[in-house]
Amino acid sequence: MLMTNSKIIAACFTILYAILIYLVFAGQMTAAMYVMAVGMFLESLICLIDCFRK
């Protein structure tokens, strides 16, 4: 779960996951897995940075 209140970051992740959904429906499973892995890594990295800032 993303622990930030930034609207910009939330919008970026919404776009990222919309691209992911498109790739899944287009049958591009390998590209979809890469996008999912990058999205999950970025979410966890942002949460980690946010935890250490507080």
Image (tube, rainbow, N blue to C red):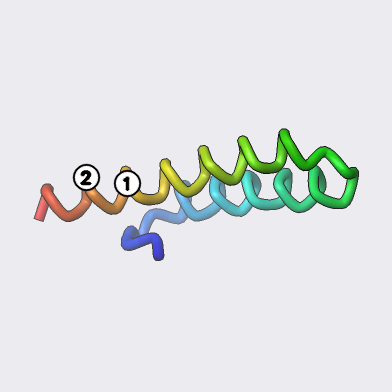
- Secondary structure type for disc 1: helix
Identify the image quadrant of the N terminus: bottom left
- The residue type indicated by label 2 comes to Ile
Point out residue 16 in the picture as x, y percentages from the top left corner: 62, 44
10 Å crowding of disc 2: few (<14), some (14-19), many (20+): few
Mark seen at residue 46: 1
Q: Residues within 10 Å of mark 1 (few under 14, many from 20)?
A: some
**Residue beneath label 2, please?**
49
Q: Secondary structure at mark 2?
A: helix
For residue 4, which quarter of the picture? bottom left
x, y percent for residue 2: 39, 60
The spot of residue 48 in percent (x, y) is 23, 49
Q: Classify residue 8 as left or right of residue 45.
A: right
Q: Which mark is residue 37?
A: none
Quick one: which residue is furthest to the front in this view? 30
Q: Residue at x 52, y 44 (%)?
A: 39
Position of 33 with respect to 37 (left or right) is right
Q: How many marks?
A: 2
Relative placement, left or right, of 34 versus 50 is right
Location of the C terminus by quadrant is bottom left
Query: Which residue is situated farthest in the right direction here?
Result: 26
Kindly indicate whether the residue at mark 1 contacts the one at mark 2 (C-beta within 8 angstroms): yes
Q: Quadrant of residue 41?
A: top left
Q: Amino acid at mark 1?
A: Ile
Q: CA distance from mark 2 to mark 1?
A: 5 Å
Image point 32% across, 46% down: which residue? 46
Which percent across, then down, holds residue 47? 29, 53
31 left or right, relative to 4 = right
